[in-house]
Image: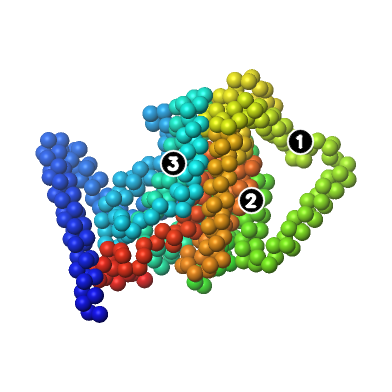
């Protein structure tokens, strides 16, 4: 037995020594290079010295890169670089990519040999192929290429970057606290925005909301026009979607807390986020929250599924009957939205254009992101003029259908179904430390499907938030096998 242990210990010394040599080599090369730069250009060398010191700190504490990245998902302020819109989350993701190989050199991170392809990447692969096929017939190759890069960034790069963390207890605790605390700030920001008549905390910090070019009131959705909380999103719908997606983690920690203290924090977060959601006055947010609660309830109590289906049918029948009997309703679809009939009519017009585009390009579509050009090429008039050249299908599935055709839509539905099936199977197994995040991922997926029916999320950071929650829900599938990591091979105990 001792011989076997000794052999394992010796087997682990070689990889550890190799990593130590690689680290030393990198330090020598970078140090020598910065020394030469400091002699030739002192200011540049000094700046690089500070940058290298910051990089070393972040390599030692990579969770703070993740924390800053997660916080930036609610700050969609962006600049255009080389024709590509880039925001804070993009910049942090690039920094994370640069640090990723250095982080893996640490002894408490997984070995490259033990990393597996995340389930999300496998599930999205058919859709990536469909996007590539649609690129060949794209109406504007540059536009569809940029949107395709976004898809890779969301569904491939982000899940792979998260693999640098070992799924230990401290990892789960950090992820829980991070996702319970960060949404509260932006919920409070929205509440302050309403209380101070548009003067939010983030505005006081110098973070301005994104505004389209032009001055027409109908193209703006900020507080001064709508009177609804929008926080850094500007539009209330963006804040509502962000809060509902975040509340999937919050409510999951209320229902299945890893510790009593975590449940208390989740309850506080629930109150704050619910108040922030109410301040948005978003019908879509309310619907998403209702679906979220329904999914979480059915996951916790699957025996209630038949009762829930019966209730949904009964409510739908009651609403239909009530609408038929209400004298104020004129019998039109637009009359179902009080105060905003033009918004409903415009959506019907846009969806009609989607059907025209699909009839002309049924299989491969016109290229992801090119529906806008197809819409304006037809000279369609809306009840609310936008004032600038931007429009989308107000439905993620229809946008994908127009951009990538029936093949792309089928591939995307396959992605959602495959991820949902994996999450359901993991939840039923109930043998993972990430159970609370598996529950949260199920709820987030349900809320996302609802939001995707009423808005176009390919323009939002919402996909990064969704992928973050889904990755956590599926994380233990990518966990290194016991005894294979560098730390264990070197004979060190894993941190609890």
Disc on the earlier residue, 1 or 2: 2
Disc on the earlier residue, 3 or 1: 3
Q: Residues within 10 Å of mark 1 (few under 14, many from 20)?
A: some
Whether residues under marks 2 and 3 lie with C-beta atoms below 8 angstroms apart, the answer is: no
Q: Residue at x 24, y 70 (%)?
A: 8
Seen in the image, is 318 located left or right of residue 268? right
Question: Secondary structure beneath disc 2?
Answer: helix
Disc on the earlier residue, 2 or 3: 3
Question: Secondary structure beneath disc 1?
Answer: helix
Q: Residue at x 44, y 62 (%)?
A: 476
Q: Residue at x 38, y 55 (%)?
A: 116
Residue 96 place in picture, x, y as percent: 34, 48
The residue indicated by pointer 2 is 288
Residue 357 place in picture, x, y as percent: 62, 27
Question: Colour mode?
Answer: rainbow
Of badges 3 and 1, the one in the foreground is 3
The residue indicated by pointer 1 is 334
Pick the quarter of the image with the C terminus: bottom left
Q: Is residue 454 above or below residue 117?
A: above
């Amino acid at each position: 037995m001792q011989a076997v242990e000794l052999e394992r210990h010796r087997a682990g010394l070689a990889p550890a020594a190799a990593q130590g040599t690689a680290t030393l080599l990198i330090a020598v090369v970078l140090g020598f290079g910065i020394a030469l730069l400091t002699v030739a250009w002192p200011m540049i060398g000094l700046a690089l010295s500070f940058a290298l010191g910051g990089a070393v700190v972040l390599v030692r504490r990579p969770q703070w890169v993740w924390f800053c990245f997660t916080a930036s998902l609610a700050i969609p302020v962006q600049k255009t670089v080389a024709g590509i819109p880039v925001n804070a989350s993009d910049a942090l993701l690039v920094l994370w990519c640069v640090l990723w190989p250095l982080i893996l050199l640490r002894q408490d991170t997984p070995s490259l040999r033990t990393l597996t392809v995340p389930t999300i990447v496998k599930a999205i692969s058919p859709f990536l192929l469909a996007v590539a096929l649609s690129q060949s017939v794209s109406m504007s190759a540059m536009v569809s290429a940029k949107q395709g890069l976004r898809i890779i960034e969301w569904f491939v790069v982000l899940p792979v970057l998260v693999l640098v963390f070992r799924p230990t207890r401290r990892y789960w605790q950090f992820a829980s606290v991070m996702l319970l605390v960060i949404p509260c700030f932006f919920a409070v920001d929205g509440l302050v925005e309403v209380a101070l008549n548009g003067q939010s905390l983030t505005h006081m910090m110098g973070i301005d909301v994104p505004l389209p070019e032009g001055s027409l009131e109908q193209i703006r959705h900020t507080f001064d026009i709508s009177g609804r909380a929008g926080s850094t999103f500007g539009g209330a719908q963006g804040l509502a979607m962000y809060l509902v997606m975040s509340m999937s983690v919050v409510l999951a920690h209320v229902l299945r807390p890893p510790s009593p203290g975590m449940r208390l924090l989740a309850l506080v977060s629930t109150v704050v986020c619910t108040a922030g959601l109410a301040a948005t006055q978003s019908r879509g947010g309310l619907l998403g929250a209702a679906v979220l609660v329904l999914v979480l309830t059915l996951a916790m109590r699957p025996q209630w599924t038949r009762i829930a289906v019966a209730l949904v049918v009964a409510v739908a029948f009651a609403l239909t009957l009530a609408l038929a009997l209400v004298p104020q309703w004129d019998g039109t679809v637009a009359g179902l939205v009080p105060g905003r009939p033009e918004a409903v009519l415009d959506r019907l017009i846009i969806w009609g254009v989607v059907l025209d585009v699909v009839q002309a390009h049924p299989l491969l579509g016109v290229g992801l992101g090119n529906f806008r050009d197809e819409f304006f090429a037809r000279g369609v008039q809306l009840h609310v003029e936008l004032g600038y050249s931007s429009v989308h299908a107000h439905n993620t599935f229809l946008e994908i259908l127009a951009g990538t055709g029936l093949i792309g839509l089928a591939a995307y539905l396959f992605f959602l179904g495959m991820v949902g099936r994996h999450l359901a199977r993991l939840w039923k197994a109930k043998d993972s430390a990430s159970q609370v995040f598996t529950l949260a991922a199920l709820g987030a997926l349900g809320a996302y499907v609802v939001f995707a029916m009423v808005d176009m999320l390919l323009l939002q950071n919402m996909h990064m938030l969704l992928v973050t929650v889904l990755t956590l829900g599926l994380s233990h599938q990518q966990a290194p096998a016991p005894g294979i990591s560098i730390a264990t091979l070197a004979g060190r105990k894993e941190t609890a």
